[in-house]
Image: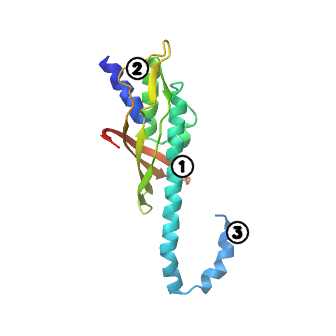
């Protein structure tokens, strides 16, 4: 029973310019004064941070959707997972799904999310965006496939969750780390 609660809690917890434009911009760049460039820099930085935040939130939403889809069949190889999630989180999610499958359980119900970006660090190597979320898993359960009974210890709660989105060299933002803080209600 204790083992079931442990893997059930673990699964719930793991649940995101072309060359032509550059050429066209060149003549304008040569006519800009130094003060124009300084004035534009904060606006450019803000725009880049907003774009990073939006891309990170999209990756986070994709991660949650892919995790739910994979959980419906306890499929650790669900193809959407790798589209939104990177290691080390990807390995943790796949391991939790594998354990659920071994124990004959699948996820069912709804999971509500209300994420916000807390930090954007485009100077980091690689660039990162930190996300904080109030996950509402009160309508989400793990159930045994053989009898549809709720897995002990899989009662959901409303709790804080955090994640980090990382921009990879190919330009994609993927969720690389995540944690459910079930001891911190929201």
10 Å neighbourhood of mark 2: few (<14), some, or many (≥20)? many
| Residue 151: numbered disc | 2
Residue for point 30% across, 19% down:
2
- How crowded pointer 3 is (Cα within 10 Å; few <14, some 14-19, many 20+) is rated as few
Judge by depth and name the residue closer to the eye, 86 or 41.
41
Q: Earlier in the sequence, mark 3 or mark 1?
A: 3
Q: Residue furthest top?
A: 146
Viewer can see residue 30: yes
* Residue depicted at x 45% and y 48%: 115
Q: Contact, CB < 8 Å: mark 3 with mark 1?
A: no
* CA gap, disc 3 and disc 1: 28 Å
Quarter in which the C terminus is drawn: top left
Label 3 belongs to which residue?
A: 20
Q: Secondary structure at mark 2?
A: loop
Q: Nearer the viewer, residue 46 or 142?
A: 142
| Camera-side mark, 1 or 2 | 2
Front residue (pair 82, 12): 12
Whichever of labels 1 and 2 marks the residue nearer the N terminus, that label is 1
> In the rendered image, which residue does mark 1 sit on?
58
Q: How far apart are the alpha carbons under marks 3 and 2?
A: 57 Å
Q: Position of residue 176 (x, y in %)?
A: 44, 45
Front tag of 3 and 1: 1
Q: How is the image coloured?
A: rainbow
Q: Nearer the viewer, mark 3 or mark 2?
A: 2
Dot 1 alpha-carbon crowd within 10 angstroms: few under 14, some 14 to 19, many 20 or more = some
**Residue 88 seen in this snapshot:** no
Q: Earlier in the sequence, mark 3 or mark 2?
A: 3
Say if 26 sits above or below 84 in the image. below
Q: CA distance from mark 1 to mark 2?
A: 31 Å
Marks 1 & 2, CB-CB < 8 Å contact:
no
Q: Looking at the image, which is closer to me, 61 or 38?
A: 61
């Amino acid at each position: 029973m204790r083992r079931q609660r442990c893997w059930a809690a673990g699964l719930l917890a793991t649940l995101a310019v072309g060359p032509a434009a550059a050429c066209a911009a060149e003549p304008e760049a040569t006519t800009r004064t130094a003060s124009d460039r300084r004035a534009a820099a904060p606006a450019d930085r803000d725009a880049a941070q907003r774009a990073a935040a939006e891309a990170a939130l999209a990756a986070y939403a994709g991660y949650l959707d892919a995790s739910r889809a994979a959980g419906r069949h306890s499929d650790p190889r669900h193809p959407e997972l790798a589209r939104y999630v990177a290691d080390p989180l990807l390995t943790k999610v796949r391991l939790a799904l594998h354990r659920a499958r071994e124990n004959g359980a699948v996820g069912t119900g709804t999971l509500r999310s209300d994420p916000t970006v807390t930090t954007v660090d485009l100077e980091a190597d690689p660039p990162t965006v930190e996300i904080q979320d109030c996950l509402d898993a009160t309508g989400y359960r793990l159930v045994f496939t053989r009898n549809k009974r709720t897995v002990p210890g899989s009662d959901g709660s409303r709790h804080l969750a955090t994640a980090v989105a990382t921009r990879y060299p190919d330009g994609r933002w993927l969720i690389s780390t995540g944690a459910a803080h079930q001891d911190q209600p929201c």
